[in-house]
Image: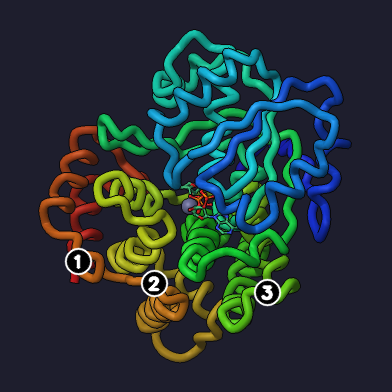
Amino acid sequence: MRNFTFQNTTKLIFGRGTIAKLAQEIPAHARLLLAFGGGSVKRNGVYDQVVAALKGREWVEFWGIEPNPRVETLRKAVALGKEHDVDFVLAVGGGSVADATKLIASSIRSALDPWDLVLNENKLGEILPFATVMTLPATGSEMNRGAVISNDATGEKFAFYSRYPEFSILDPETTFSLPDEQIAYGICDTFVHVMEQYMTTTGQSPLMDRWAEGVLQTLIEVAPRIRADKHNYDAMADYMLSATMGLNGFIALGVSQDWATHMIGHELTALEGISHGQTLAIILPALLRVLRDQKQDKLVQYGERVWGIVEGSPAERAKTAIERTEEFFRSLGLATRLCELGVGEKTVEEIVRRFSSRGTVLGEGRNVDAEKVAEVLRLCRS
Ligand code: NZQ
Ligand code: ZN
């Protein structure tokens, strides 16, 4: 196990009816900005619960944060926050609203353009405290420092890191209104977060391995129950907590990581507008196939412990483990080939060009370069 320092400062408030606790958690004299997406929270009653919980307080509202939040939209939210001199931001919605809030909170007291902050974390100054009421389990944004922001003008999508939410409220009942495809994207996103912190090399930490395998097994167990009945509170609660535990740092202590699938996926979203979770369902199986020899020992461990694969040579078992992963994504109703979404060679070439010009090398072995990215993309084209 490698050395590490770990401090996650987010207070997690979980369960039915917990939005009512909002007023207790937000400082009494806070000048509040509430950030929202496109309106799902108005239709499912979450907005009403927030308003009821904040009775007697004053706030300003910013609406219209889109999925894959665009810096062009967030500049308007920052201007509103500056105009009202807010000192606390509350995100109410999915990962996009939470991510957007991290950039808004980082920009309100800054003279710099928000995109400048995304590209240069060293320029981050005062970051306002913020919190979330999370309505979509997927990103883990409710309990991590990450945010992923898009730029329409340049067609780019980049991650940046600010601070942890002060607290996050997770009421599984708020997820009952999620469309089926968002649940599929969210389960896949969570699964791939865990895989990118686990599917590296064996023998680094049996504790981290089993923790990750536990989250993967839980997702595999609850996914069909959720597909059968998305109002199943217990299944939704386990899915929601899996999403948080999948990307709050707990399963990555002292082990190597491989974020190649996410980095390639972000380019597909930036260029083709494909939903985040959907990009991962296409890229991960192809990436594992390209790196099968390098990751074989871990694939065999994963196959045995997560999928019960005990027959065949190590190479055969690794191959079967990748097939089972792909079948799982298909069982969620997701595509696993680029051609299913009409993505052609032009996009593949542009992604490879970007990785090549940035000189990026990804993966735990720092060997996923532009050439390997091309191999991965061509493998999942058809
Ligand atoms: O905008 P509204 O109207 O609220 O509707 C949203 C949106 O259309 C809807 N929705 C959310 N909760 C709902 C609901 N509809 C009905 N009932 C509910 N309870 O779902 C749609 C998608 O929402 P979005 O927030 O975009 O989805 P998600 O949570 O999957 O977030 C995706 C974004 O997070 C980034 C992704 O790149 C993408 O930009 N990620 C952030 C990470 C992080 N902060 O650590 C890590 C992830 O890997 C990911 O990259
Ligand atoms: Zn993700």
Residue drawn at the location 65% of the way across and 45% of the way down: 142
Mark in the foreground, 3 or 1 = 3
Q: Position of residue 218 (x, y in %)?
A: 65, 72
| Labels 3 and 1: the sequence-earlier one | 3
Q: Is residue 304 visible?
A: yes
- Residue 359's label in the rendered image is none
Q: Is residue 201 visible?
A: no
| Labels 1 and 2: the sequence-earlier one | 2
Q: Which residue position is annotated with label 1?
A: 381
- Alpha carbons under labels 2 and 3: distance apart: 21 Å
Mark in the foreground, 1 or 2 = 2
Q: Nearer the viewer, residue 119 or 309?
A: 119
Badge 3 crowding class, 10 Å Cα cut-off, few under 14, some 14 to 19, many 20 or more, is some
| Labels 2 and 3: the sequence-earlier one | 3
Left or right for 189, reference 144: left
Q: Farthest bottom residue?
A: 311
Taking 86 as reference, is 370 above or below it? below
- Residue 334's label in the rendered image is 2
Residue drawn at the location 24% of the way across and 52% of the way down: 373
Mark in the foreground, 2 or 3 = 3
Badge 2 crowding class, 10 Å Cα cut-off, few under 14, some 14 to 19, many 20 or more, is many
Residue type at mark 3? His
Left or right for 29, reference 110: right
Residue type at mark 2? Leu
- Alpha carbons under labels 1 and 2: distance apart: 15 Å
